Image (cartoon, coloured by chain):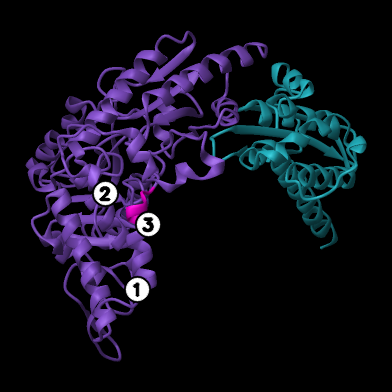
Amino acid sequence: MAIPKIFVSDTENINVEDVRKQFPVFSQAENRELIYFDSAATSQRPQFVLDAWNKFNTNYNANAHRGAYRMAELATLEYEKARSKVAGFIGASSEEEIVFLRGATEAFNLVAYGWALKHVGKGDEIIVSELEHHSNLIPWQMVAQKTGAALKFIPFDNEGQLVLTEYEKLLSSQTKLVAITQMSNVMGSPIPVNKFIKAAHHVGAVVVIDGSQSVPHFNINVSEMDADIFAFSGHKMLGPMGTGVLYAKQKLLEDMDPMMFGGSMIEDVDYLKSTWNQVPWKFEAGTQNIPGVIGLGAAIDYLNALGLQNIKQHDKSLTVYALEQMQLIKGLEIYGSVVERGPVIAFGLDNVHPHDLSTFLDNKNIAVRSGHHCAKLIMKRLAVNATARASFYLYNSKNEIDAFIKALDQAKEYFSKWN
Amino acid sequence: MELDDLYQEIILDHYKQPRNQGQLSNATVHISGKNPFCGDELDLSLIIKDDLVQDIAFKGSGCAISQASISVMTEQVKGKTVNEVRELIDKFSGMVKGEKKIDLDTLEDLSAFQGVCEYPTRVKCAMLGWNALKKAIDSEQNNEKTEQNDAKS
């Protein structure tokens, strides 16, 4: 399947009009006016990804790693091809370090059950940042509760940056695991994880990085970063829902127990016990989301063809513009940095609950997220129950931001009668 | 649908000046409610005696829909019997979920929330207080049963 031609050159700037034509959601009659500013929750999907997904279903639907006939072999081949694409995309040293799961959440749970419960004990410490999405927090709470290990937290500053000096004070020979996001899904802050990983390795701790927000927008290289474990979801990077990736260094994967048991994850089976398949397949029990993974592979082809550098540039110019305009609105508060941030902006309007604001914007066909963003530790730190959040991606335009700013002004006017 | 159909005058009035705020020191039942979807919080206290809701108060923070809904609810249930309250919970829930044809006249001020059914995600906001109220009367009735059983044994 050919990738749309306009993307062949990686020096070309993103032409939003052309990009949008490739995302069928925007051409549906009911969505013509839609301004979709919630890509941090889930991105839209290009036809190219849907076609790959659909082609599996219509042309070669068969189970992978099982049958020895043409279709089954093709299914296996395409499924495993996606694994190589992911490995290349994030700079893993081998595709055997890539495990396909349902999403980042499942990846963290697998590490919690399969590795942490085995290696963390009473008296040990787990360090988690206060920026974490619940998916990279609750599994570690579970581990702490089951093992008697202590949980310690890295605070963040007003810019949404983790405080390195505080982190260094927490590290000790007791530290077994450190869990950090590469970009906050609320504060939008890109975290210089390399420094945090290096410091953790000094004390022999394993580092888990949440790449859910960073992978769709930035060039990632897990080998250079030296992350022990890195996880992300497919659906925030143009891929299908129900797809996710766990990367872990081969030695760690070898040492990790499976969480799911059943078909295809075994090497040999006897009455009372069995042995496991080699990594990564020992973690992929049962029939996998094969069309989803193939769709994720297509999403990577699409992002590569467009060029992550170009996407980053595009996202950045939108973010800078939105921040500039939003700061002109009196009574609007932006949480986190107005300088150094990815395309995710959490904000609030004086005396207006984010849900009411979101309903108002929805009435203008603008989709923003409102709530605690599955990051209640951040809400506690900001001393709010909820915020609104606008997030941008390759199909968004400056015109949309203009409409958004205008709607925010109107919201201010509308809600002023409530005070 | 126009936004003003959702945010009716009664709702705004209760949002701006919530009734029955606070905590009852001599409450017979006490429930805290949370909307896991948005983080809204509620602390509801009631005095239920002789099958009557004699007093009710709340503390909470949240959006206009959730706070106004709780405020109107406290006004409406005060002085009603537990069975009457249960009936009202059913009616209100049926209306905001758009499940039932409800005679709106019987709901008085609560009919202001009829627009909520057009906004499925906001149903949880409108129901926050009512779900807590249901929990409260359930737990109160369970307590009574236990006490009666204790007395028998």
Cα distance in 3D space between marks 3 and 2: 13 Å
Magenta residues?
A: A45-50
> Dot 1 corresponds to which residue?
A59
Front-lying residue, A260 or A219: A219
Q: What residue is drawn where x is 22% and y is 43%?
A: A7
Q: What residue is drawn where x is 34% and y is 73%?
A: A59
Q: Residues within 10 Å of mark 1 (few under 14, many from 20)?
A: few
Say above or below: A256 vs A198. Answer: below
Decide which of tag 3 and tag 2 comes sooner along the chain. Answer: 2
Front-lying residue, A291 or A178: A291
Determine which of the numbered discs, if any, sits on residue A131 in the image: none
The nearer-to-camera label among 1 and 2 is: 2
Outermost residue, bottom side: A271
A50 on left or right of A182:
right
Amino acid type, residue under disc 3 in the picture: Leu
Q: In purple, which chain?
A: A
x%, y% of residue A227?
14, 46
Are the residues under badges 1 and 2 in a single subunit?
Answer: yes
Q: Which subunit holds the residue at mark 1?
A: A
Secondary element type, mark 1: helix
Q: What residue is drawn where x is 58% and y is 33%?
A: B40
> Dot 3 corresponds to which residue?
A50
Secondary element type, mark 2: loop
The nearer-to-camera label among 3 and 2 is: 2
Determine which of the numbered discs, if any, sits on residue A4 in the image: 2
Check the picture and name the quadrant holding the C terminus of chain B. bottom right
Q: Which subunit holds the residue at mark 2?
A: A
Decide which of tag 1 and tag 2 comes sooner along the chain. Answer: 2
x%, y% of residue A225?
11, 42
Amino acid type, residue under disc 2 in the picture: Pro
Q: What residue is drawn where x is 49% and y is 25%?
A: A384
